[in-house]
Image (cartoon, helix red, strand yellow):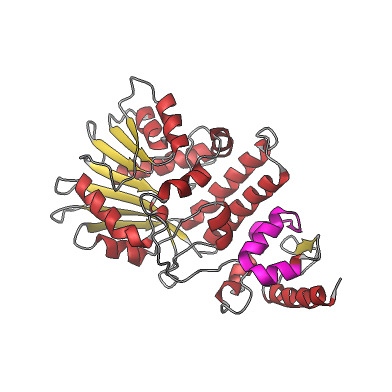
């Protein structure tokens, strides 16, 4: 090992030690370094280098979730810009709108246009790529059904209503309302060609639902209810108000409802970009909002009726996705680099939720005159 590598090893070892992580230690949350170039690379490249060196097999950890939890608890993400940041490298606000109408499709397609077989294997029959509710559930499908049941109750759905699902994914809400025979007609919006083609193929000509390949900013329609489930994270701070104005236009009736399930950062973070590794390899252009930003964007348009957070529920959801993916990755034809990327992604996010560094909440807004709101349909 060269002099530079030795100095880099000493520096990284000290930083990990602050989070009670031992380099080449024997505990499940310790790391084993397989390539001595790791230390210089991480010091120079921070969070992005940490993730990419893991993908390439330069280091291993038996329990990534616990490793990330200790890094977060140790506060390494709070170090100044002149010091190494192993998990977070939040930038200043960008001049350009990365989530504009013309740029947004490329960002979405980078992740959501993976072959549909990948998502079928990872997500299970419901094809639901959002946080579930596990309080009374023992399986992923039960937990996702519990989440959809709660959404429908909070929207006070009644037979004959029309619902706009912005960022509808692979149509899990459509599946749920059909199984429960709720008599609701859902229109789904997506800017993912792969999702649109999947739904166009699976809905069938007799379906009461329909799907549009369209950005919310250029879509037109009138509905009784509007919802978005973990889509707002792709809107971007520069477009928060435009999103709320668009939803306001979709809901012409007084006392109509808008529900958002959204992943947020603490109000003190106000980050303009996500973690550099996640931004490059998983969710390009994503930007987690704070709850304060969401409420500010709704001012003068909606009345706030309800907020409920359940971030800890996301941990078992992410672990279930990982277990499903890990069983199927060879059959999917994925190489080891892709497998390690998926493991890093799902365990990193699991630790963020488990430590409370990010949260997921359901927020309900009403339009028009104040009205007594109940979550019971």
Judge left or right: residue 39 versus residue 110: right
The answer to whether 345 is drawn above or below residue 84 in the figure is: above
Please give left or right for residue 345 compared with residue 35 in the image.
left
Residue found at x 30% / y 31%: 182
User: Which of the 4 image quarters holds residue 359?
Assistant: bottom left
Viewer-closest of 161 and 269: 269
Judged left or right of residue 277, residue 38 is: right
Where is 53 relative to 269, above or below? above
Residue nearer the viewer, 3 or 268: 3
Residue pictured at 63% horizontal, 43% vertical? 323
Outermost residue toward the right? 1
Instruction: Name which residue lies at 14% across and 48% down.
Output: 254
Residue 2 visible: yes
Left or right? Give the position of 365 relative to 39: left
329 inside magenta stretch: no
- Position of the C terminus by quadrant: top left
Question: So how many labels did they put on this image?
Answer: 0
Magenta segment's dominant SS is helix
**Residue positioned most to the top:** 206
Residue 232 vertical position relative to residue 126 in the rendered view, above or below: below
Q: Position of residue 123 (x, y in %)?
A: 54, 39
Closest to the observer, 205 or 358: 205
Q: Write the residue at 70% across / 57% down.
A: 54
Q: Which residues are magenta?
A: 39-68
Q: Quadrant of residue 304?
A: bottom left
Residue 374, visible in the rendered structure? no
In the rendered image, the quadrant that contains the N terminus is bottom right
Q: Residue 234: percent from the left, percent from the top?
A: 42, 53
Expressed as whole percent of the image width and height from the top left, the position of residue 89 reads: 55, 68
Residue 368 drawn above or below residue 195: below
Membership of 58 in magenta stretch? yes
List x then y, in percent, for residue 308: 37, 56
């Amino acid at each position: 090992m060269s002099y530079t590598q030795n100095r880099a090893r000493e520096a990284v070892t000290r930083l990990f030690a602050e989070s009670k992580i031992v380099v080449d230690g024997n505990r499940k949350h310790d790391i084993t370094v397989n390539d001595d170039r790791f230390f210089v690379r991480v010091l120079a490249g921070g969070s992005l280098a940490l993730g990419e060196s893991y993908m390439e097999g330069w280091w291993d950890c038996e329990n990534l979730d616990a490793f990330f939890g200790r890094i977060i608890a140790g506060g390494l993400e709070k170090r100044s810009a002149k010091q190494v940041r192993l998990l977070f490298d939040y930038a200043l606000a960008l001049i350009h709108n990365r989530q504009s109408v013309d740029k947004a499709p490329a960002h979405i397609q980078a992740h959501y246009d993976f072959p549909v077989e990948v998502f079928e294997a990872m997500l299970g029959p419901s094809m639901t790529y959002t946080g579930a509710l596990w309080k009374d559930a023992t399986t992923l499908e039960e937990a996702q059904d519990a989440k959809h049941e709660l959404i429908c109750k909070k929207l006070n759905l009644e037979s004959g209503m029309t619902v706009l699902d912005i960022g509808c994914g692979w149509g899990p809400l459509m599946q749920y309302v059909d199984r429960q025979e709720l008599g609701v007609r859902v229109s789904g919006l997506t800017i993912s060609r792969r999702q649109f083609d999947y739904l166009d193929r699976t809905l069938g000509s007799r379906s009461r639902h329909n799907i549009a390949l369209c950005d919310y900013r250029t879509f037109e329609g009138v509905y009784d209810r509007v919802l978005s489930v973990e889509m707002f994270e792709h809107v971007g701070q520069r477009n928060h108000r435009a999103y709320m104005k668009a939803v306001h236009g979709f809901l012409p009736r007084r006392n109509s409802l808008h529900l958002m399930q959204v992943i947020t950062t603490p109000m003190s973070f106000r980050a303009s970009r996500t973690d550099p590794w996640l931004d490059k390899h998983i969710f390009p252009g994503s930007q987690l909002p704070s709850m304060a930003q969401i409420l500010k964007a709704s001012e003068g348009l909606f009345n706030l009726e309800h907020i409920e957070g359940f971030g800890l529920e996301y941990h078992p959801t992410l672990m279930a996705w990982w277990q499903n993916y890990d069983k199927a990755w060879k059959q999917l034809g994925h190489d080891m680099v892709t497998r390690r990327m998926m493991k890093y992604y799902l365990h990193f996010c699991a630790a963020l939720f488990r430590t409370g560094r990010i949260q997921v909440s359901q927020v309900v807004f009403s339009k028009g005159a104040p009205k007594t709101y109940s979550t019971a349909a």
